[in-house]
Amino acid sequence: MTDQRSAAPTNEALDISKPHSAMPPDDMPEARAIRFHLRGDHDLIECQVSWAALDALEGGAADSAADRLARFAQHRMGIEAAALRKMNDGSESSRAAPLRIDADDVLNAPSV
């Protein structure tokens, strides 16, 4: 019997219209960031959006972890777009460390 967790994902499993994983975001006080995951070509990519980025999106500091997670949920599409841009521009060469998304990455998005 094959362990499905260790099998490489198929193209059907990587639906680009749904870039986030099934793993919920979590608040990480030690890193002052919210951790979330994006689906890569063959794996999940750990990403972190800084609390400062979330504060900049809302114009003030959040009062609690619940507020930060709510802000993340509200701005998730923009945050994921910033993460995808950062992944695709080649500036993040090391996949060992989490992909860090800061305020500039989210706020300086190219206009469409």
Image: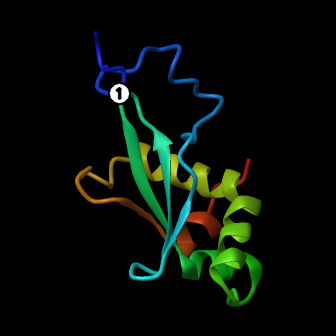
Counting labels gives 1
Q: Is residue 49 left or right of residue 54?
A: left
Picture coordinates of residue 105, whole percent (x, y): 54, 65
Figure quadrant of the N terminus: top left
Q: Quadrant of residue 100?
A: bottom left
Point out the residue furthest to the top here. 1
Residue for point 77% across, 61% down: 74
Picture coordinates of residue 106, whole percent (x, y): 60, 65
Picture coordinates of residue 4, whole percent (x, y): 36, 20
Q: Is residue 6 left or right of residue 103?
A: left
Q: Nearer the viewer, residue 67 or 53?
A: 67
Q: Is residue 87 left or right of residue 7?
A: right
Looking at numbered disc 1 in the image, what kind of residue is underneath it?
A: Arg
Q: Quadrant of residue 59?
A: bottom right
Give the secondary structure at mark 1: loop
Q: Residues within 10 Å of mark 1 (few under 14, many from 20)?
A: few
Residue for point 72% across, 89% down: 60
Point out the residue furthest to the front here. 1
Q: Is residue 75 left or right of residue 41?
A: right
Q: Nearer the viewer, residue 23 or 75?
A: 23
The residue where tag 1 is placed is 5
Residue for point 66% across, 85% down: 64
Q: What colouring does the structure picture have?
A: rainbow
Picture coordinates of residue 30, whole percent (x, y): 39, 82
Residue for point 46% across, 82% down: 29
**Rendered view: 47 above or below 12:** below
Q: Nearer the viewer, residue 111 or 39?
A: 39
**Rendered view: 15 above or below 61:** above
**Rendered view: 78 above or below 90:** below
